[in-house]
Image (cartoon, helix red, strand yellow):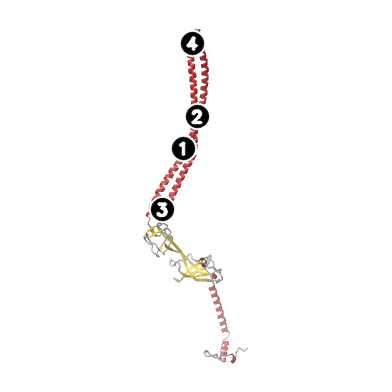
């Protein structure tokens, strides 16, 4: 097959004044073509090998560039601990300066503690008083309990004794009444004998001595009747006395039965005193805390920043005085495009390059945010409109340093970094 090409006048491009390169003559082109064919198969193999090398290199380059996702929309993040006052007062000392590195527990600010020391002393005194009152109230509880038991037992015994006395007095009354009846019967007989003996002595049928004996017997019978009646009256009075004692004992017993309620009142007072002591103890603890809060210390290791407090200033509760940037716990927030998250997942190896130092750090993906950054903005986008324009969103990805990676406290939150996540 003839590969020689022949130019036709009709196929030539029209000459132009701007053209500076003249076409090669047909003979010279044929000469070059024959020279290429005369180089043999080795040249053609070299060309094929070069093409293969270029393909392999292109493949590995494609593999390399497709094995990671990178972004320069990333920065170092960290905790900014806000230091604020927990008590109000006058600032006596400012113990740190701006950009000073402090360790956890380092004193930062001293508020005048004298007012809080006075409050603490007052709370101690109030607690001691309440504690003594509570102890005294507790002592009254067992004493009242024992006294209550004894009072009830004594009142029940008095009631039993009164009932027994009434029963004995009734027996005495019955005996006295029997004696009265006997004395009345004897007196009737003796008085009748006296009347008969009077008639007989008037007729001188009996001696005067017998009559006198009868008169004496009549007088004795009258006296015995009077004594029997007096004894019966005394027995009745004894019954009334014992009944009065019974009434008094019953009243004492009723009063004694109210002792459990009185004991409950004593116990309630003791519990109230204990509650008051606990309240005073809580006030004492609060006073101690308030005194401790006058010395403000650093909660974490970090650098003092954004300090606004000065000596002589009156601070209020919750007023921010400075911030401490925790340099021991920092991470990187990288805002990747949503199209870059297809193969990204927590745990993947990453590399960050800090713009300030030109140094790379070994890191890994810790987590991926639950929403795009736009949704957390002050005015989140509203796409339910007719002028909707699709915009590729960015999703924050949290990248943390490996456990053995040292940061030497040179990284600062807000520094710009370039993040590269190896997804394959």
Q: How crowded is mark 4: few (under 14 residues within 10 Å), some or many (20 or more)?
A: many
Dot 2: what SS? helix
The residue wearing badge 4 is 211
Sequence-wise, which precedes: disc 4 or disc 1?
1
- Res 31 → quadrant: bottom right
In the image, is residue 49 above or below residue 291? below
Identify the mark at residue 147; answer none if there is no mark.
1
Sequence-wise, which precedes: disc 3 or disc 1?
1
Sequence-wise, which precedes: disc 4 or disc 2?
4
Looking at the rendered image, the quarter that the N terminus falls into is bottom right
Sequence-wise, which precedes: disc 1 or disc 2?
1
Q: Which residue is drawn at 41% across and 54% down?
A: 290
Which residue is more in the foreground, 414 or 222? 222
Identify the mark at residue 288; answer none if there is no mark.
3
C-alpha span from label 4 to label 2: 48 Å
Q: Position of residue 110 (x, y in %)?
A: 38, 58
* Mark nearer the viewer, 3 or 4: 4
In the image, is residue 265 above or below residue 199? below
Q: Position of residue 202 (x, y in %)?
A: 49, 8
Residue 268 visible in the displayed image: yes
The residue wearing badge 2 is 243
């Amino acid at each position: 097959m003839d590969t020689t090409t022949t130019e036709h006048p009709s196929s030539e491009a029209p000459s132009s004044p701007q053209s500076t390169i003249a076409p090669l003559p047909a003979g010279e082109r044929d000469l070059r073509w024959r020279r290429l064919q005369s180089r043999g198969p080795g040249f053609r193999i070299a060309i094929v090998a070069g093409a293969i090398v270029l393909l392999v290199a292109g493949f590995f380059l494609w593999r390399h560039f497709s094995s990671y996702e990178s972004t320069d929309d990333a920065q170092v993040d960290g905790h900014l601990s806000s230091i604020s006052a927990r008590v109000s007062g006058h600032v006596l000392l400012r113990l740190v300066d701006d950009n000073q590195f402090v360790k956890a527990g380092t004193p930062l600010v001293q508020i005048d503690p004298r007012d809080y020391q006075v409050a603490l002393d007052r709370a101690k005194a109030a607690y001691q008083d309440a504690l003594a009152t509570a102890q005294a109230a507790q002592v009254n509880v067992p004493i009242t309990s024992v006294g209550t038991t004894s009072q009830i037992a004594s009142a029940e015994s008095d009631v039993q004794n009164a009932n027994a006395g009434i029963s004995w007095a009734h027996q005495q009354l019955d005996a006295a009444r029997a004696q009265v009846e006997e004395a009345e019967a004897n007196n009737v007989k003796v008085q009748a004998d006296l009347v008969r003996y009077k008639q007989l002595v008037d007729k001188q049928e009996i001696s005067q001595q017998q009559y006198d004996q009868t008169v004496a017997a009549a007088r004795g019978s009258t006296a015995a009747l009077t004594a029997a009646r007096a004894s019966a009256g005394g027995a009745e009075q004894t019954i009334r006395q014992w009944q009065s004692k019974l009434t008094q004992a019953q009243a004492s017993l009723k009063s004694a039965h109210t002792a459990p309620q009185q004991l409950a009142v004593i116990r309630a007072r003791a519990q109230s005193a204990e509650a008051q002591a606990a309240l005073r103890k809580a006030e004492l603890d609060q006073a101690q805390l308030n005194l401790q809060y006058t010395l403000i210390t650093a909660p974490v290791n970090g650098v003092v920043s954004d300090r606004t407090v000065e000596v002589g200033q009156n601070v209020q509760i919750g007023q921010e005085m400075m911030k401490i940037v925790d340099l021991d716990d920092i991470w990187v927030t990288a805002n990747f495009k949503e199209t870059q998250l297809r193969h990204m997942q927590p745990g993947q190896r990453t590399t960050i390059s800090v713009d300030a130092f030109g140094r790379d750090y070994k890191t890994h993906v810790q987590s991926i945010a639950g929403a795009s950054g736009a949704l957390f903005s002050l005015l989140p986008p509203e796409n339910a409109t007719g002028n909707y324009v699709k915009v590729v969103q960015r999703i924050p990805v949290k990248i943390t340093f490996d456990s053995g990676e040292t940061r030497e406290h040179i990284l600062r939150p807000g520094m710009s970094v370039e993040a590269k996540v190896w997804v394959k």
